[in-house]
Amino acid sequence: MVLGEAEPVLPRLLPALARLTDRRNLIEIGATIPGCYVPSAYSFRYDSDGRVREISVSDGLPQQVHRVSLKKSDQAAHSEILSPDAELGMYMTELGRGCSRGCRFCAAGFIYRPPRLWSADAVLDSLDQRPSEVNRIGLLGMEMADSELLDRISGFLQANACSLSFSSLRADRISPRLLELLSHSGLKSVAIAPDGCSERLRGVINKGLSEDDLIAAAVALVDAGIYTLKLYVMVGLPTETEQDLEEFVQLVQKIRENIRPVGQKKGRLCELILSVNSFVPKPWTPFQYLSFGGQEREQAMQDRDCTAAVLNLKKKIKYLKKSFARVDNLHIKVDRPDKVLSQAVFSRADRRIGPALLDIGMGKATFKQAMKKHKLSSWQYAVRPRDSDELFCWQVVDQGIQAGYLAKELERSLTGQSTPPCDTSLCRRCGVCGENES
Ligand code: SF4
């Protein structure tokens, strides 16, 4: 397995693979090429309570496999194969990699560090290489784009009669230039992600979006002719209470009151789509220590099964569904916490889950049956709170993040402290930039 980004690894890996005559020599590749992980050369020992006690490694291999990343690039990666049958069916171009925001629930924000933004020339060059008949463009990493880059992209798209598409927008980065771009692109709906139900919770997760940011973004989008707004939010975040959910109900109400007159002036009805999802703790994030279901540590340890965690989430979803039940022009989509439980198990599972995955994948068993057959505990993987000094199976990978940094970030989160966005020229906070830079 190659851990990290392909570009720095492939020039050495491909000739080495071409020379390979015996699979056993893969170990040599793992020993000599950074980023190459040979799972069979690593073995895990577990405690009787299921925790990882020790990770041992064959001679000559690193104790941890360093994830590799591209420092800079004068090319922006883009779609090479386009097919009408492809899911998105558009020409995708990277504006950069990683994300500078440090949202504490987001795995991508930590495992793709440091954030990097490609030059405007590189991005425009990549856009220029699209097949002439393709005029729908998807931009990846738009949150980080500065106004100069957006200006140049906007100019290019207008000059080439292209339209723009993207997955979601950061509510505090909606500039007049971006709105102009959206308007020209004829987008019918845009998603913004408060992620946390209340302003306090958005502090806990380091999202840093205020109620005013969200209302202003909604008004600006409707004013630019986008009449369907999607709002993504999670339940089961740490420290969440009913008061936080109530604040979300009020926020939605305020958004509706603010966008209605703007839509009416244009003779249009505005529609809100709320997407409510159960939070799943992810490895390599400050929330990797927490319980699925949002329970306090003591309660999660006491229960020793997942029923209370799932019930807790179901109650919150029910509360939101009821609160929005008879609201005009509003749709609410919710997930099913009992189904999301399997995601929460897979998220922090180790190699003992392999046989169960095989049974599920081959259609031989449902998730529940497979866990039972292989004597695996969903509670152990999904709900058991982790200790700050615990050894995790994913620590076989070295992401470049200093030991203890994620635990410190969790502490900051629970004491309501925010962490500023990355500034790669100055910041040496998490260990990825500077001396330890890959
Ligand atoms: S060292 Fe600072 S700038 Fe670099 S990835 Fe870590 S937090 Fe971001």
Image (spheres, rainbow, N blue to C red):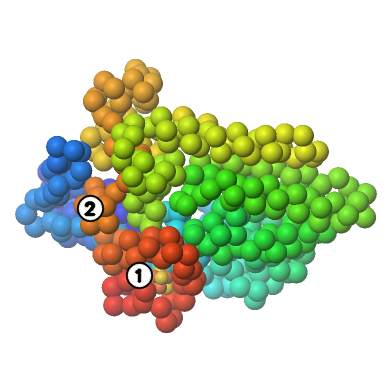
- Residue visible at 69% across and 72% down in the picture: 151
Residue 374 lies in quadrant: top left
Left or right position of 284 against 336: left
Mark 1 CB in 8 Å range of ligand 1?
Answer: yes
Where is 410 relative to 309, above or below?
below
- Residue visible at 14% across and 41% down in the picture: 47
Left or right position of 108 against 179: left
In front here: 344 or 313?
A: 313
Badge 1 local density, few (<14 within 10 Å), some, or many (20+)?
Answer: some
Q: Position of residue 383 (x, y in %)?
A: 35, 40
Where is 287 relative to 413, above or below?
above
Amino acid found under the numbered disc labelled 1: Cys
Instruction: Please state the quadrant of the image where ligand 1 appears.
Output: bottom left
- Give the residue number, with chain letter if any, for mark 1: 430
In front here: 203 or 32?
A: 203
Residue 163 lies in quadrant: bottom right
Amino acid found under the numbered disc labelled 2: Glu
- Residue visible at 68% across and 47% down in the picture: 249
Badge 2 local density, few (<14 within 10 Å), some, or many (20+)?
Answer: few
Mark 2 and mark 1 lie on one chain; the one further toward the N terminus is 2
- Residue visible at 11% across and 51% down in the picture: 57
In front here: 39 or 155?
A: 39
Q: Secondary structure at mark 2?
A: loop
Q: Position of residue 272 (x, y in %)?
A: 74, 45
In front here: 90 or 424?
A: 424
Gap in Å between the C-alphas at discs 2 and 1? 19 Å
Q: Can residue 379 be seen? A: no
Left or right position of 107 against 37: right
Left or right position of 191 against 63: right
- Give the residue number, with chain letter if any, for mark 2: 390
| Label drawn at residue 421 | none
Do the residues under discs 2 and 1 have CB atoms within 8 angstroms? no
